[in-house]
């Protein structure tokens, strides 16, 4: 990314706890890898990495998230998620995971990255309700996932559906609601054989309706979208 | 002074849009629902990729207690901006429309080009609290190679309502390229307007810059291939000679492994 920040600070959380902090001074182009910012930290299955741009005043900055494995590199350009103050009351999230591929050679993961920062974790749960439907709208299963704070959680769509006895022959669409933290949501396609990846950030409700950011509409939207949600 | 004219025209266009949306919000039964329409994205239907379009019945998630049919319209253009075909699909509450573009359209499209999605609702009842809505979707580039992974991009900008006037302004992308196995990058640019538009793409790397140019027909799409080898980093600058809505080329990186990955810039 390009930034006018005075300091770039990268934090790595492992299993929800802060494991390392690394700082760099910005240059014209800033491109850092996990092997740089947490070089001595053994890789964990549950890692969350945050980037703090100290002194940056532009709020609509985009960053590039890159993955590479010696065969390919893939990346997604995405806006930055703000770190909220301690005690911030988070609204539940709503994610439409309608774009799943069920071919044998691929897996589709919905990736939840959530952040509450270094302060005390919220007292409420960070559960998400996962409603599994086929593309013809029939409800096949309803389940919950509990996502640890400051964590990264991968939801393998096909495996979740199968584990609840859902048939896959008419496709899958997931409605995912809930949570009590700041989420960034991605979808990752993986080729099971080669490990090759495709990634894109989600489209939250604000892309579909102005209601979440319109003070005259927001309360009615929240009631309609989440009024029946019990977690 | 002359460079102010396009901005004034664009502002007038936005003001006209705002008035129209205000009327639709106030009287949807009379003027139609306030929907931000004509969202565009790239398709590929070539040796490397086919394209699957996934469109959710978005009112289901936003207003689950309603039961409104949504008619999604799809218009597909070839690389020269000629209409290949159009179709409509009715999608019911909580359904998802997800099919290859050729199946949705009922015919084979070009090797690449732009498609446009619109929608209309069977009723405006019960969704006034959503205000302006939009038929967002996802585009999945399904690889022909057995080793590659599907690539994905979200729906992008809207078709221009008013032909944009000429105004050059370079846009530098935050998307940087570079990898030890990188052998090249192909950029696809869509003309979201009905005016012929010229584009210069500059890819700047450690050993200098390369410029490729294209003439985009109205609703047309151009593919520009760059030999970008190694770690780079390579930085893209896109300069269009008209202020069209869609100004973010879609990048497809090619690697020595034969794999290809994509991202919007």
Image (tube, coloured by chain):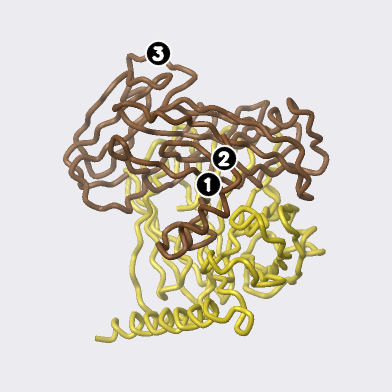
Chain colours: A brown, B yellow
Marks 1 and 3: CB-CB under 8 Å?
Answer: no
Q: Measure the alpha-carbon separation of dots 2 and 3.
A: 25 Å
**Where is residue B25 shown, x and y percent of the image?**
53, 76
Q: Nearer the viewer, mark 2 or mark 3?
A: 2
Q: Which one is earlier in the sequence, the residue at label 1 or at label 3?
A: 3
Q: Is disc 1 surrounded by few (<14), some (14 to 19) or many (20+) residues within 10 Å?
A: many
Q: Which one is earlier in the sequence, the residue at label 2 or at label 1?
A: 2
Label 2 SS? strand
Label 1 SS? loop
Which one is nearer the viewer's eye here, B263 or B80? B263
Q: Which residue is mark 2?
A: A187
**Above or below, A126 relative to B76:** above
The residue at the point 70 percent across, 40 percent down is: A101
Res B72 → quadrant = bottom right
**Where is residue A66 shown, x and y percent of the image?**
44, 36
Q: Given the image, what chain letter belongs to the residue carrying mark 2? A: A
Marks 2 and 1: CB-CB under 8 Å?
Answer: yes
Q: Measure the alpha-carbon separation of dots 1 and 3.
A: 29 Å
**Above or below, B192 relative to B146:** below
Q: Which one is earlier in the sequence, the residue at label 2 or at label 3?
A: 3
Q: Which mark is residue A202?
A: 1
Res B145 → quadrant = top right
The residue at the point 79 percent across, 29 percent down is: A165
Left-right relation of A17 to B148 = left
Q: Given the image, what chain letter belongs to the residue carrying mark 3? A: A
Which one is nearer the viewer's eye here, B67 or A6? B67
Q: Which residue is mark 3?
A: A42
User: Are callouts 2 and 3 both on one chain?
Assistant: yes
Q: Is disc 2 surrounded by few (<14), some (14 to 19) or many (20+) residues within 10 Å?
A: many
Label 3 SS? loop
- State the quadrant of the N terminus of chain B: bottom left
Q: Nearer the viewer, mark 1 or mark 3?
A: 1
């Amino acid at each position: 990314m390009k930034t006018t920040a005075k300091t770039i600070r990268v934090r790595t959380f492992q299993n929800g706890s802060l494991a390392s902090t690394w700082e760099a001074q910005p240059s014209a182009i800033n491109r850092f890898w996990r092997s740089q910012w947490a070089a001595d930290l053994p890789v964990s299955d549950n890692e969350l990495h945050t980037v703090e741009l100290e002194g940056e005043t532009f709020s609509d900055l985009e960053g590039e998230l890159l993955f590479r494995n010696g065969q390919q590199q893939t990346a997604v350009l995405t806006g930055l998620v703000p770190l909220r103050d301690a005690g911030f009351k988070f609204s539940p999230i709503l994610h439409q995971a309608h774009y799943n591929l069920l071919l044998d050679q691929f897996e589709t993961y919905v990736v939840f990255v959530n952040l509450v920062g270094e302060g005390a974790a919220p007292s409420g749960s960070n559960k998400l309700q996962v409603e599994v439907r086929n593309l013809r709208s029939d409800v096949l299963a309803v389940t919950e996932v509990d996502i640890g704070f400051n964590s990264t959680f991968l939801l393998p769509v096909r495996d979740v559906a199968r584990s609840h006895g859902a048939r896959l022959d008419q496709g899958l669409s997931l409605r995912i609601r809930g949570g009590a933290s700041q989420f960034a949501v991605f979808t990752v396609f993986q080729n099971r054989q080669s490990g090759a990846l495709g990634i894109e950030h989600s489209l939250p409700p604000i892309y579909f309706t102005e209601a979440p950011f319109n003070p005259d509409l927001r309360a009615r939207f929240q009631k309609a979208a989440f009024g029946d949600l019990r977690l | 002074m002359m460079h102010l004219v396009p901005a004034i025209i664009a502002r007038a266009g936005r003001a006209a849009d705002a008035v129209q949306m205000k009327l639709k919000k106030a009287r949807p039964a009379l003027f139609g629902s306030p929907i931000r329409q004509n969202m565009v994205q790239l398709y590929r239907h070539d040796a490397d990729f086919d394209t699957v379009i996934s469109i959710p019945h978005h009112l289901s998630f936003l207003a689950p207690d309603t039961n409104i049919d949504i008619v999604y319209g799809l218009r597909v253009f070839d690389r020269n901006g000629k209409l290949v075909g159009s179709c409509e699909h009715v999608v019911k509450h909580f359904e998802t429309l997800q099919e290859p573009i050729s199946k949705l359209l009922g015919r084979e499209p070009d090797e690449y080009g732009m498609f446009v999605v619109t929608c209309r609702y069977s009723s405006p009842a019960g969704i006034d609290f959503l205000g302006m809505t939009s038929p967002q979707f996802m585009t999945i580039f399904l690889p022909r190679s057995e080793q590659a992974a599907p690539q994905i991009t979200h729906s992008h900008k809207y078709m221009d309502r008013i032909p944009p006037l000429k105004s050059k302004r370079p846009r530098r992308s935050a998307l940087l390229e570079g990898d030890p196995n990188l052998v090249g990058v192909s950029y696809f640019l869509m003309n979201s307007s009905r005016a012929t538009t010229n584009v210069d793409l500059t890819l700047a790397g450690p050993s200098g810059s390369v410029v490729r140019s294209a003439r985009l027909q109205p609703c047309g799409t151009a593919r520009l291939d760059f030999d970008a080898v190694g770690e780079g980093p390579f930085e893209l600058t896109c300069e269009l000679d008209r202020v069209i809505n869609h100004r973010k080329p879609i990048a497809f990186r090619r690697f020595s492994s034969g794999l290809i990955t994509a991202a919007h810039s």
